[in-house]
Amino acid sequence: MSPEPAGLVLAAGAGTRLGQPKALVRLAGETLLDRAVRVLESGGCKPVVTVVGAAAEEVRVAAPRVSLVENPHWSTGMASSLRVGLETFGAEIPAVVVALVDQPHVGPDVVAALVAAWRSGAAAAVASYGGRPRNPVLLDRSVWDDVVASVTGDAGARDWLRAHPETVTLVNCDHLGHHRDIDTPADLEAARFELEARA
């Protein structure tokens, strides 16, 4: 068995539309950050690192057991957080699953499916819902340099993935959850209702 891929949570934003940093939001008894880390770990990622920016000190206090790295340029967009996160990992890390902190309906099964695709040879594995690529995304180390060189603004790895369809393996996750994120208070209430209904 090859070494496990690492996990990377992007959680640096200020959550302007939500009214608070998403990493600190509590949902179903845990913060969104704790949930994202737990999902990556349970899905087969080790270690898991979180990139923070806005409210970094508050997040550090709220999540003392989470491995954090700070992005001083978080306000420039997701690309800088992805770059900071990838540069955190040593040469022994063979791949990374990149997840967003605000997707509480993504579970460990989605992460495990991406890891399985990577173990079968995928250089980039992307969760798809309804046939459309979404998050999370797994990136083999062999593509990191190209990804880092190409990312800009708030697009993350999206533009690189679109430009290299021959490298991308879409992993159907329709039966494993959905990709809806939390951007507004209404989104949060909808997620809370859905998760409580499942409990």
Image (cartoon, helix red, strand yellow):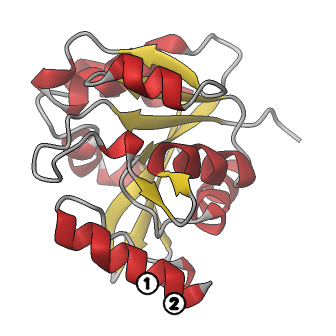
Q: What type is the residue that disc 1 sits on? A: Glu
Say which of 16 and 132 sits in front.
Answer: 16
Residue that numbered label 2 is attached to? 197
Q: Quadrant of residue 154?
A: top left
Report the side of 49 relative to 134 (left or right).
right
Q: How many residues crowd around disc 2 within 10 Å: few (fewer than 14), some, or many (20 or more)?
A: few
Helix, strand or loop for disc 1: helix
Write the residue at 17% across / 40% down. Answer: 155
Relative to 165, residue 196 above or below: below
Q: Position of residue 84 (x, y in %)?
A: 37, 16
Relative to 185, residue 166 above or below: above
**Which quadrant of the rendered structure holds the N terminus?**
top right
Q: Where is residue 48 in the image (x, y as percent from the top left)?
A: 62, 32
Q: Where is residue 50 in the image (x, y as percent from the top left)?
A: 49, 29
Q: How many residues crowd around disc 1 within 10 Å: few (fewer than 14), some, or many (20 or more)?
A: few
Q: Do the residues labelled 2 and 1 touch (CB within 8 Å)?
A: yes
Residue that numbered label 1 is attached to? 194
Helix, strand or loop for disc 2: helix
Task: For residue 187, say whether it is visible.
Answer: yes
Write the residue at 10% across / 51% down. Answer: 17
**Which quadrant of the rendered structure holds the C terminus?**
bottom right
Q: Position of residue 101 (x, y in %)?
A: 40, 47
Q: What type is the residue that disc 2 sits on? A: Ala
